[in-house]
Image (cartoon, rainbow, N blue to C red):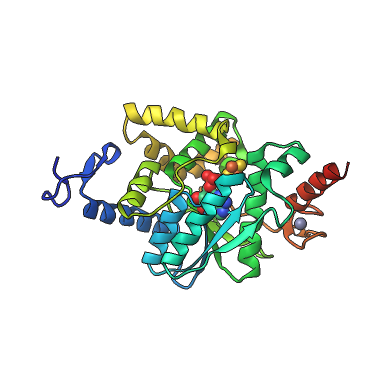
Amino acid sequence: MKCKRCRNAAAAVDLPSHNSAFCPDCFFVFFRRQVEVGIRKYSLLDPSDRVLVCVSGGKDSLVLWDILMEFGYDTEGLYIDLGIGDYSDRSREKVLAFAAARGKEAIVVDLRREGVPIPETAKRSHKEECAVCGTVKRYFFNRVAASRGFTVVATGHNLDDEASRLLGNLMHWHGEHLERQHPLLPDAGEGLVRKVKPLWRVSEMETAAYGFLKGIDYVVEECPMSHDATSLVYKEALSLIEEKMPGTRSNFYLGFLTKKGTFLNSLTGAETNGAPFSPGETSGKCTACGAPTYAETCGFCRLKEKAGKEAAR
Ligand code: AMP
Ligand code: FES
Ligand code: ZN
């Protein structure tokens, strides 16, 4: 099959959802354009931004860092070593090698050194690994950004991630989560830095193809703790639908963002009209660590305390 853009070279990437197929060069043009449109649509980034790119060693976040550098943004990478055995060691190696090849040095936070490696912290606090992991990662994303003068935190969530999250939120009628779900979470002052997801328009397959064709070396294995994560079930369900009806996933998520206002107004009674969720003022600073929080201590410090108490027993 010939590339549908240049009509010259052989197509290397088949995109049924766009009713298209591209040769590598034309696919690069297509992919970059999708990310550019995604950034521009909600003003996710500005050329004056200092961007903290959170990189796990997986394809999405390394592709994100690569493309933001290529677009000319001022970026640094942050890797959080979760303390999950060989998996974390291999991921760290990929991140450091990727950064070094581009003359960069990634910032590394080691959770073992911070006293909160995920497996042990989850066990001691009697919580799911993924829930603990989410709290801890969000905390350090924001803390590193705020303390080092970054204006925005970028993560590699792609269309598949966001669509499956949307399906999960709808299935359980999580009104508040639906309200927050957006590629842009504006900053709320008081050290709560803006969060953006520039890959929200591109699918997992497109990101994987881009990473592969660009020769980006990433960790292929999934986190060993995430095998029973419910998000994977929603992803599988959407993949099945997408296979039968190409374009449904994108229609589902992009439609949600467009119709979010009217839809949520009737669901929650709020007059959001589809604007990105505004986090509002936090009530103050965590009395233990100084992070912005709505309670007396932040979620991270409460978790750390709970895990610490259990360890002392
Ligand atoms: P996940 O929650 O694993 O699907 O990852 C979503 C995004 O969070 C990734 O694309 C990264 O941007 C970021 N992320 C996940 N794990 C890490 C990590 N260990 N260190 C830094 N960023 C991460
Ligand atoms: Fe968070 Fe595996 S990446 S528990
Ligand atoms: Zn705290």
Residue 215 percent location from the top left of the image: 34, 54
Residue 248 percent location from the top left of the image: 36, 34
Residue 146 placement, left or right of 255: right
Q: Quadrant of the N terminus?
A: top left
Q: Nearer the viewer, residue 34 or 62?
A: 62
Q: Quadrant of the C terminus?
A: top right
Which residue is at a point 43% across and 68% down the rendered structure image?
73
Q: Which residue lies furthest to the right in this view?
A: 313
Residue 2 placement, left or right of 121: left
- Taking the image as drawn, is residue 131 in sight? yes
Q: Nearer the viewer, residue 161 or 10?
A: 10
Q: Which of 70 and 33 is in front in this view?
A: 70
Q: Residue furthest left?
A: 8
- Taking the image as drawn, is residue 180 in sight? no
Using the image, determine if residue 122 lies above or below residue 238: below
Which residue is at a point 72% across and 57% down the rendered structure image?
114
Which residue is at a point 33% across and 36% down the rendered structure image?
247
Which residue is at a point 52% across and 51% down the rendered structure image?
91
Image quadrant assignment for residue 206:
top left
Residue 285 placement, left or right of 256: right
Residue 204 percent location from the top left of the image: 40, 43
Residue 236 percent location from the top left of the image: 45, 30
Using the image, determine if residue 78 lies above or below residue 27: below
Label tally = 0
Q: Residue furthest front?
A: 86
Residue 97 placement, left or right of 213: right
Q: Nearer the viewer, residue 271 or 313?
A: 313
Using the image, determine if residue 55 lies above or below residue 247: below
